[in-house]
Image (cartoon, grey):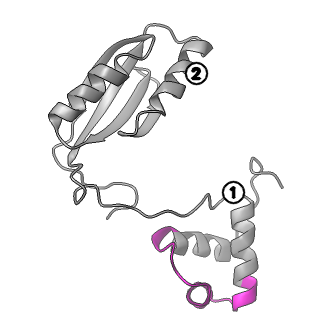
């Protein structure tokens, strides 16, 4: 099965996914116990979920506040052209900016919604002016500054 095909997940597969999404460092023994399977069948299912692309990888989730990255802004970006070449160029360039945590092509008044995390407003201003606004075909931007993050991926 290639990664684009979807297979039917049963309750054990879904439970494995729920558990590892919350604790990616869980031991196989503990996972099997929590899922209600013996170790070998749980391991087989886990490996298949990885092979099928349901689990894309594991990583450490760093605490941005402890690292001094307390400033979050969402930037709405409007392009002057949305032909395939312009879209691809924007996609390629935005991926190079390390302060960009997320970027989504959206439907609406703007073409993209970009999440940027920096140390402060001046750092954000530099990223916006020197990098994001300098990408070819960027016609306009609008910034929404986060006052307080309530829920973020990987964080409570």
Q: Circle 2: is it few (<14), some (14-19), or many (20+) Cα within 10 Å?
A: few
In the rendered structure, which segment of residues is drawn in magenta? 21-41
Residue 15: mark: none
| Camera-side mark, 2 or 1 | 2
Residue 53 - label: 1
28 drawn magenta? yes
Tell me the element at label 1. loop
Percent x, y for residue 68? Answer: 21, 52
**43 with respect to 58 (left or right):** right
Q: Which comes before the other along the chain, label 2 or label 1? A: 1
Q: Is residue 51 left or right of residue 108?
A: right
Q: Residue 11, how many percent across, how many down?
A: 65, 74
Mark 1 packing: few (<14 Cα in 10 Å), some, or many (20+)?
Answer: some
Compared with 105, 36 (above or below) is: below
Q: Quadrant of residue 53?
A: bottom right
Question: Which is nearer the eye, 92 or 10?
Answer: 92
Tell me if residue 102 comes above or below residue 47 in the rendering.
above
Name the residue: 48% across, 34% down: 95
Left or right placement of residue 127 versus residue 34 in this view: left
Q: Residue at x 59, y 91 (%)?
A: 33
Please state, as top left, top right, bottom left or bottom right, where the N terminus lies in the image.
bottom right
In the rendered image, which residue does mark 2 sit on? 88
Residue pushed farthest right?
Answer: 1
């Amino acid at each position: 099965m290639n990664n684009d095909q979807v297979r039917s997940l049963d309750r054990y597969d879904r439970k494995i996914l729920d558990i590892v999404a919350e604790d990616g460092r869980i031991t196989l023994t503990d996972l099997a116990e929590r899922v209600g399977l013996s170790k070998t069948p749980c391991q087989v299912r886990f490996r298949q979920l990885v092979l099928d692309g349901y689990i894309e990888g594991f990583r450490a989730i760093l605490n941005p506040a402890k690292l001094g990255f307390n400033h979050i802004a969402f930037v709405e970006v409007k392009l002057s052209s949305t032909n395939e070449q312009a879209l691809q160029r924007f996609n390629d360039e935005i991926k190079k900016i390390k302060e960009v945590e997320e970027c989504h092509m959206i439907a609406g008044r703007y073409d993209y919604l970009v999440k940027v995390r920096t140390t402060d407003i001046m750092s954000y201003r530099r990223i916006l002016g020197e990098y994001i606004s300098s990408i070819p075909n960027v016609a306009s931007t609008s910034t929404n500054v986060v006052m307080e993050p309530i829920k973020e991926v990987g964080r409570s």
